[in-house]
Amino acid sequence: MAPPDPQSSIPLYARTDLEQRRDWYAPAAEAYARARPAYPQALIDEVSERAGLTAGSRILELGCGPATATVAFAQSGASMLCLEPNAEFCRLARRACIAYPAVEILPLALEEWPPEANGFDAVLAATSFHWIPQEIACSTAARALRPDGSLILLWNMELQPSSEVHQCLREVYQRHAPALDRRDDRQTRLATLQTLGRLVEDSGLFGPLASGHVETTLTYDTEEYLSLLSTYSPYLKLEAESRRALFEGLGERIERHFGGSLQLSLLSAFQMARRA
């Protein structure tokens, strides 16, 4: 059986019922905050420069999660209004941003927020834009931006093991979760980014889309890697017993064949466009 096309699932998250989206990451919120990687500083610096962000800027962040990207922008002194429907993420984000009084975090989804017209220099979404219903995502972002303001999308694509590691782990996946036996190569991840960018381009509400990406390698030990996997949606969907058996098998193989440590490939990207 061919692995699922990751691009085909992009719109499905946004069409999920709000209450399900609100609670989706609740079981893995702490793991998400620990295991998900930060965004490369080079991307933060580039989008900040392109958008002309300064200490006097005002940023609206959509779906801030546990503040994975928030702190990097708050450090500039900009004021931020962050929307996050998940209660656990709100708690973690407030804890992460306690040193930044100009950051306000509201427990709301974008569709619950009373839009503030022309109030922000930038609208930021860090690996969250695909969770927002597209009929409101671009229109509300454009309305919230000041004239010539920028929509900034940041993406950390799912971390990928090497082909050698994947081949070694396939037997475990086939035994316990065959639908998850897939590895996205570089071209697949870049194609997914193009699909995500078209969500903005097709709206007709923004100017030309600028984009760029950075590729890095991160080291995770066995526990960190399994914690990371537990935050990805396909693993959250697994029944508890299947997930337990899968993780037990993966952990045993990583320890035995790779000394308890993996090198993972991370593709990080930005996409941004000014309000038309």
Image (spheres, helix red, strand yellow):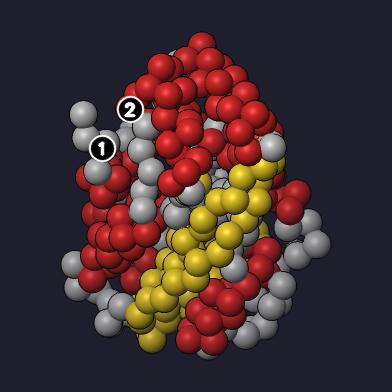
Please indicate whether residue 66 sits to the left or right of residue 120 in the image: right
Q: Quadrant of the N terminus?
A: top left
Task: Work out how far the residue at label 1 is from the one at label 2, CA to CA, in angstroms.
Answer: 8 Å
Dot label at residue 118: none
Q: Is residue 222 above or below residue 159?
A: above
Q: Hey, what amino acid is under mark 2?
A: Ala
Few, some or many residues within 10 Å of mark 2 (<14, 14–19, 20+)? few
Q: Is residue 228 above or below residue 170?
A: below
Find disc 2 in the rendering and name its residue: 179
Q: Nearer the viewer, residue 12 or 42?
A: 42
Please indicate whether residue 234 sits to the left or right of residue 79 in the image: left
Residue 138 in the image, given as x and y percentages of width and height: 30, 64
List the single residue furthest toward the top. 241
Sequence-first tag of 1 and 2: 1
List the single residue furthest toward the right. 99
Res. 138 visible in picture: no
Taking the spot 58% from the left edge, 60% from the top edge, the residue there is 217
Residue 111 in the image, given as x and y percentages of width and height: 38, 49
> Could you tell me which secondary element the residue under label 2 belongs to?
helix
- The image quarter containing residue 183 is top left
Residue 189 in the image, given as x and y percentages of width and height: 35, 57
- The image quarter containing residue 231 is top right
- The image quarter containing residue 5 is top left
Dot label at residue 4: 1
> Could you tell me which secondary element the residue under label 1 belongs to?
loop
Q: Quadrant of the C terminus?
A: bottom left
Q: Are the residues tagged 1 and 2 within 8 Å (C-beta)?
A: yes
Please indicate whether residue 124 sits to the left or right of residue 180 in the image: right
Please indicate whether residue 14 sits to the left or right of residue 163 in the image: left
